[in-house]
Image (tube, rainbow, N blue to C red):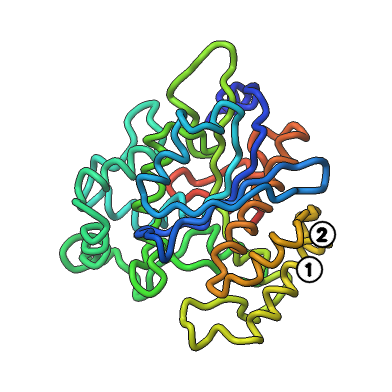
């Protein structure tokens, strides 16, 4: 994204709302997408509410320009990859999908995700495409282990899962289902894409960033686990870890320099979620708050590095 484009993007009206999204590639009522809404005043970020979205259609409505909060603008941290490893994308363009290369003036992230959706019928098709790398196509280009992006290995104290992983923790499927919906909704992704739609005067901003809740959780807890989807592992130790993490967030004891403001009921609501989805959404919300501090200080990239690989993306505050 050019300096001129970033400047134009930053000239839009400041977003009122901050948002953190714990994403699922196959949400339902049992395991919904969890959205934490908040507002920031200086170094204090107040949790306003938590929403549960039971479908991908509901997620599309959330990020659409017609959403009730779009008129006031939002800045969101989304817990799914905004890109794929450069090694995979280069092999894909050279040996399987040349149309994934961007045309003149087209954002690379748009070209890639649209080509993947045109080629793969669904997320299982995307999984098959990854599985076929090195055997069905791109012989000799696949390493022994799934490669990571630069951002995945730049996180202090932890490492995020490769976006090509479609089993166990299916972050590849989260990329497939998540990013193209942000692109289709014409959300600005600083460092990756600017909105195609232009209005005069400058539009209210809808800004999206890749967030990673494990970043702050690891800073506070180290390797202690605070959540599990397995009921047999939802034990008192993990409850105590969640309470420790919430205490640290309320007291501002992270490198982001923000204090989380909760009501007693909200605190109990976060602590009682043994799966950790609500707390993960709040961790993404705090990363969005940090980006908003950078925006308010005049950084059009909202804390993103000056040079981001447009097919890999970057994790906010890494």
Residue at 38% across, 75% down: 168
Task: Name the residue at the front extreme.
Answer: 265
Against 109, residue 220 (above or below) is below
Residue at 25% across, 49% down: 94
- Left or right of 296, for residue 111: left
Q: Residue 245 at x, y = what percent? A: 72, 70
Give the mark nearer the N terminus: 2 vs 1: 1
Q: Residue 236 at x, y = what percent? A: 65, 86
Helix, strand or loop at label 2? It is loop
Q: Can residue 112 be seen in this view?
A: yes
Against 77, residue 143 (above or below) is below
| Cα distance between the residues tagged 2 and 1 | 9 Å
Q: Is residue 305 visible?
A: no
Of 43 and 215, which appears nearest the observer? Answer: 43
Could you classify mark 1 by the number of other residues whose Cα lies within 10 Å: few (under 14), some (14-19), or many (20 or more)?
A: some
Helix, strand or loop at label 1? It is helix
State which quarter of the image contains the C terminus: bottom right
How many numbered tags mark residues here? 2
Q: Name the residue under label 2.
A: 252
Q: Residue 227 at x, y = what percent? A: 57, 76
Q: Name the residue under label 1.
A: 247
Q: Residue 181 at x, y = what percent? A: 38, 42
Against 189, residue 169 (above or below) is below
């Amino acid at each position: 994204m050019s300096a001129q484009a970033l400047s134009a993007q930053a000239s839009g009206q400041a977003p009122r709302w901050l948002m953190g999204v714990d994403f699922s590639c196959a949400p339902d009522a049992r395991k919904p997408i969890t959205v934490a809404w908040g507002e920031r005043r200086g170094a204090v970020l107040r949790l306003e509410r938590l929403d549960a979205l039971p479908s991908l259609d509901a997620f599309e409505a959330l990020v659409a320009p017609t959403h009730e909060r779009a008129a006031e603008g939002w800045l969101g941290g989304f817990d799914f990859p905004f890109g794929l490893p450069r090694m995979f994308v280069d092999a894909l363009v050279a040996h399987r999908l040349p149309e994934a290369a961007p045309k003149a003036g087209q954002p690379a992230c748009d070209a890639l995700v649209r080509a993947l959706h045109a080629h793969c019928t669904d997320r299982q098709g995307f999984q098959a495409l990854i599985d076929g790398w090195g055997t069905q196509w791109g012989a000799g280009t696949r390493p022994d282990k799934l490669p990571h992006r630069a951002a995945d290995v730049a996180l202090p104290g932890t490492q995020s899962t490769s976006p090509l992983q479609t089993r166990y923790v299916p972050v590849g499927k989260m990329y497939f289902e998540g990013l193209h919906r942000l692109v289709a909704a014409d959300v600005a992704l600083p460092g990756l894409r600017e909105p195609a739609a232009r209005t005069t005067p400058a539009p209210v901003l809808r800004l999206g960033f890749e967030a990673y809740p494990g970043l702050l959780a690891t800073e506070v807890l180290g390797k202690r686990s605070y959540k599990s989807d397995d009921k047999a592992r939802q034990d008192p130790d993990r409850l105590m870890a969640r309470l420790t993490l919430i205490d640290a967030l309320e007291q501002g004891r992270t490198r982001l320099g923000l204090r989380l403001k909760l009501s007693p009921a909200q605190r109990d609501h976060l602590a009682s979620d043994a799966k950790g989805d609500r707390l993960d959404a709040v961790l993404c919300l705090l990363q969005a708050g940090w980006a908003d501090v950078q925006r308010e200080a005049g950084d059009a990239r909202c804390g993103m590095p000056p040079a981001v690989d447009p097919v890999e993306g970057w994790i906010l505050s890494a």
